[in-house]
């Protein structure tokens, strides 16, 4: 990547530390097509090898590179500096609503534990079919499942959610989106258990529909609508006289 001829350097502030720490300042050359992740990598390689951050694929697949960039959670490998730092300044912080391991790296365990709590795994039942199921692509359930299936587990929605900030036990938009995807999987045999898992004070009823998750998801997934779907499914179940 070449430095952009004649353009000013980028002024970058990076969080260093854990819950307590400070912002460290770096001046980095602006480069053509530079991403925010390129900036972080350049800092780590050329200026301070002790900087901690996380990435793997660099192409928007793995979900590991998310950070707060100029106040907003984003995936950094697909975020061009030119889109977010028109004035030539960047402030990089770890994702909110996660414990900080160090610098820009956060602890994801609680986030993925909540997927488990929401029964966010396929349950084929005691006698799974031997052959592949035929699920018509135009079916209502298949389309609802497809709408949420491309989640990469990046945590951007979870970092943006105020309810997670207020109530750390709230399952959060990603786990609930996963649950809704499975509620619409016609092959799954544990729907009652899953609806039970996402009900209660820290489940889908806690969502106040404020849409930050949907607004910021880099994969254009709409957890707010998934959560509304779970609420509808629960209501239908109770109208049918279910638990
Ligand atoms: S819509 Fe619900 S899950 Fe999404 S950010 Fe708002 S409160 Fe959180
Ligand atoms: S729903 Fe979107 S923002 Fe949330 S974890 Fe999945 S891909 Fe990331
Ligand atoms: S590095 Fe994999 S999504 Fe960004």
Image: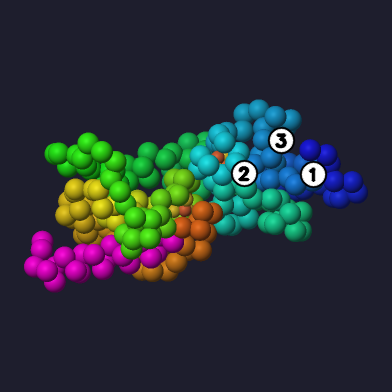
Magenta-colored span: 222-243
- Earlier-in-chain disc, 1 versus 2: 1
Mark 2 CB within 8 Å of ligand 3: yes
Mark 3 vs mark 2, foreground winner is: 2
Q: Which residue is mark 1?
A: 31
Q: Residues within 10 Å of mark 1 (few under 14, many from 20)?
A: some
Give the residue at x 44% y 61%. 222
Report the label total.
Answer: 3
Q: Residue furthest right?
A: 6
Q: Which residue is mark 3?
A: 42
Give the side of residue 138 with respect to residue 96, left or right. left
Q: Determine whether the residue tagged by mark 2 lies in a helix, strand or loop.
A: loop
Instruction: Quadrant for residue 206, please give it.
Output: bottom left
Q: Which residue is mark 2?
A: 77
Quarter of the picture containing the C terminus is bottom left
Mark 1 CB within 8 Å of ligand 3: no
**CA separation, marks 1 and 2?**
15 Å
**CA separation, marks 3 and 2?**
13 Å
Quarter of the picture containing the N terminus is top right
Q: Determine whether the residue tagged by mark 1 lies in a helix, strand or loop.
A: loop
In the rendering, at what x and y percent does residue 213 appear?
46, 60
Q: Nearer the viewer, residue 124 or 107?
A: 124
- Earlier-in-chain disc, 3 versus 2: 3
Residue 21 is at least partly visible in this image: no
Give the side of residue 67 with respect to residue 227, left or right. right
- Earlier-in-chain disc, 3 versus 1: 1
Q: Is residue 234 magenta?
A: yes
Give the residue at x 17% y 42%. 125
């Amino acid at each position: 990547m070449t430095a952009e001829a004649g353009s000013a350097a980028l002024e970058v502030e990076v969080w260093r530390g854990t819950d307590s720490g400070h912002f460290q300042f770096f001046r980095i050359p602006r480069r053509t097509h530079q991403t925010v992740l390129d900036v972080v990598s350049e800092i780590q390689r050329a200026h301070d090898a002790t900087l901690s951050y996380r990435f793997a694929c660099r192409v928007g697949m793995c979900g590991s590179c998310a950070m707060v960039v100029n106040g907003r959670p984003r995936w950094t490998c697909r975020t061009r500096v030119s889109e977010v730092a028109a004035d030539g300044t960047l402030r990089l912080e770890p994702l909110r609503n996660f414990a900080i391991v160090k610098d820009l790296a956060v602890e994801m365990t609680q986030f993925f534990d909540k997927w488990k709590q929401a029964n966010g795994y396929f349950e084929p039942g005691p006698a799974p079919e031997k052959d592949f199921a035929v699920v018509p692509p135009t079916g209502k359930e298949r389309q609802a499942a497809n709408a949420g299936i491309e989640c990469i587990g990046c945590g951007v929605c979870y970092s943006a959610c105020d309810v997670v900030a207020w109530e750390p036990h709230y399952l959060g938009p990603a786990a609930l989106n996963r649950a809704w995807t499975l509620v619409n999987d016609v092959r799954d045999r544990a729907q009652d258990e899953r609806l039970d898992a996402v009900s209660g004070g820290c489940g889908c009823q806690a969502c106040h529909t404020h849409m930050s998750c949907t607004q910021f998801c880099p994969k254009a997934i709409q957890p707010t609508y998934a959560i509304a779907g779970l609420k509808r499914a629960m209501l239908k179940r109770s109208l049918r006289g279910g638990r």
